[in-house]
Amino acid sequence: KIPRTFNTYFFLSSIIRDTINNNGDASNIIMLINLLWSSLKVSTVTALLQTPGGSPLRSTRNSIVFLQMSSSSRDRQTSSSSWSATNPQDCKDAKDKLNIWPLDEYNARLLNEVHPKSWPNTNPDVIYDFIAIGAGAGGLVSSRQVARRGGKSAMISSHLAGGDCLNVGCVPSKALIRCARMIREVRKAKEQSEFGVRVHGDIEVDFGAIMERMRKLRAEIAPIDGHERGKSIGADVYQGFGRFVNENTIEVIPSPDEKPVQLRFKKAAICTGGRASVPSGIPGLMEAPFTTNETLFNLTTLPPRMIILGSGVVALEMAQVFATFGTKVTVLVRGNALFPRVDPEVGSYLKRHLEQHDNVTFLTMAKLNRIETLQEVDDKDDLPLMRLTVQSGEKEFKLDTECLLVATGRVPNIEKLNLEAANVAFDVGEGILVDDCARSVSNPNVFSVGDCTAGVPRLTHMSGEMAKQVVNNALFGDEWKLSSLVVPSCMYTEPEFASVGDVSVNDEVDIYTTSLEHNDRAILDGDRNGFVKIYCQKGTGIINGCSIVASRAGELINEVSLAMKYGITLEGIGRNIHCYPTTGEAVMGCGLQLINAKWKRLN
């Protein structure tokens, strides 16, 4: 019998090929094909395929082949096996079940890669060397690396392969950030005639085109994270929700009309990621049509006003982006400064820049007391209306907004995994409890990777590196340590803010600072905003950490990360020859300060 999702053309052609290869008479097959495709009323055709001697076509197959295909079912096969922008039910399912809209051609392409409508879950009678629960960076890297290195691996994808990074994080946000930077450049060229660019008339921002570009590029990147790519590498891919049955078995629960599949493993990794944390106890919040990073990139209409609850990386990146697009943005800061745990100059510098250059409004010491929904959304292009009561210091404000972005941190996705059955210890707010090898503290055959892990930086590149560690530790007896990692981070505002290591200020630290004000490349680019700070153990060149505020700070920080990883001192960075003119010379400049302080001098 041919499954309804089988490619019938391919099946029939393979029968012809096999018949000819076995010196059989293919005339009856050709006649059958002509009959089947010229008369689509045929619902069932039975063909007896025999070689001239009467022996079966293949010794290992039944010689009777049942073809069950009608005109209507063939059409359904084409239309129902893939997401389609013209199918109303697909549009509804994409929005209601997967939080993806609008379902245009690009989002359809995305979903066909990362959450196919029809994906067969096999049930092999094998014990997997390794199973990854989750299909973000951690699950993708670990399951595929195991397959490449000769192991039998599987990955379980419950939502969208690629995780937050591809679908609702790094990729879509950086696409919007690029458009915002282009807009600022055009405005700068118009306002500053010295660049020799003459811009006449108003500069118009086409928000619809910006979002379409984002969806297009996201769909272009998606195949590398898609199910077919994983399968081609050798990793089995299961679509459904994975949960533990016992200490060496995972159950995959697909759609309601399919039976669960149980998979046995030698080693497993929990790679389920995290999600936006939504604060409790704020009257009206849960009833309000607020947005998080999971729905922000579905917008099709630019909101005139946006209020952002939170002042971390996501909050500030999107504050600058939407302010550049033309939205009036207000950021609610719980404390009195940005990034209170790092060098205070960083937070004050960025706040001042966003206020002066991007017209972002900050309310410090802010508390959201109440939300009232004034208007619900009736159409996908409509925007809601909310009224927020906000306390800032001694003052109370009533602020109306069409978009409330909640960006107050992340929580791990570990609910419903049935961790108790696998004897996996966890903390509900922090994640899976692991040792320094990313191994569960209570079950040595289970590891944890990425945002669902307690006590690790919640960054995509951290997940990718942890995945490599876990593969080596779980299957090859290595002991790669989490404590050995030097993990940089970057906020992609303009200027960017990148940091690595310990950047706290105290009496046991020497700080070396280089401003971009006198950096030749920054002068030539007309962008002197920012500085480099390197923090060393007092009286030495041993680097504790680094903070960089500059355009492309995320590129500059990697030199310092490498130095810290391999014990290169600040003097070593200063003696490293840098290309001229580059902003990277500002990093070298910090090293030169230390070198120059130790110069020998002529009497």
Image: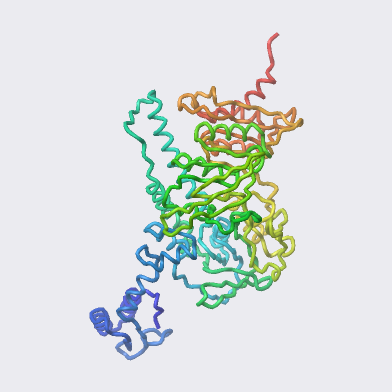
Instruction: Give me the residue at 67% from left, 24% from top.
Output: 594
From the viewer's perspective, is residue 28 above or below residue 146?
below
Q: Quadrant of the N terminus?
A: bottom left
Q: In front here: 288 or 439? A: 288
Report x, y in % for residue 65: 36, 85
Residue at horizontal 46 percent and vertical 70 percent from the top = 119
Residue 500 visible? The answer is: no
Report the coloring of the rendering: rainbow
Task: Tell which residue pokes out farthest to the top in this image.
Answer: 603
Question: Is residue 66 depicted above or below 337 in this figure?
Answer: below
Residue situated in front as seen by the camera: 13 or 463: 463
Q: Residue furthest right?
A: 507
Side (left or right) of 201 relative to 112: left
Percent across and percent down for residue 401 are 51, 47
Which is more toward the observer, 416 or 437?
416
> Toward the viewer: 261 or 527?
527
Residue 78: image quadrant is: bottom left
Instruction: Kindly tell me whether residue 459 is visible in this rendering.
Output: yes
**Residue in the image at 54% along x and 24% along y:** 517
Where residue 13 sits in the image (x, y, percent)?
31, 75
Q: Residue at (40%, 26%) from the top-left corner?
A: 192
- The number of discs equals 0
Looking at the image, residue 155 sits to the left or right of residue 416; the answer is: left
Q: Percent x, y for residue 586?
A: 57, 28
Say whether residue 524 is left or right of residue 414. left
Quadrant including the C terminus: top right
Q: Residue furthest bottom?
A: 54
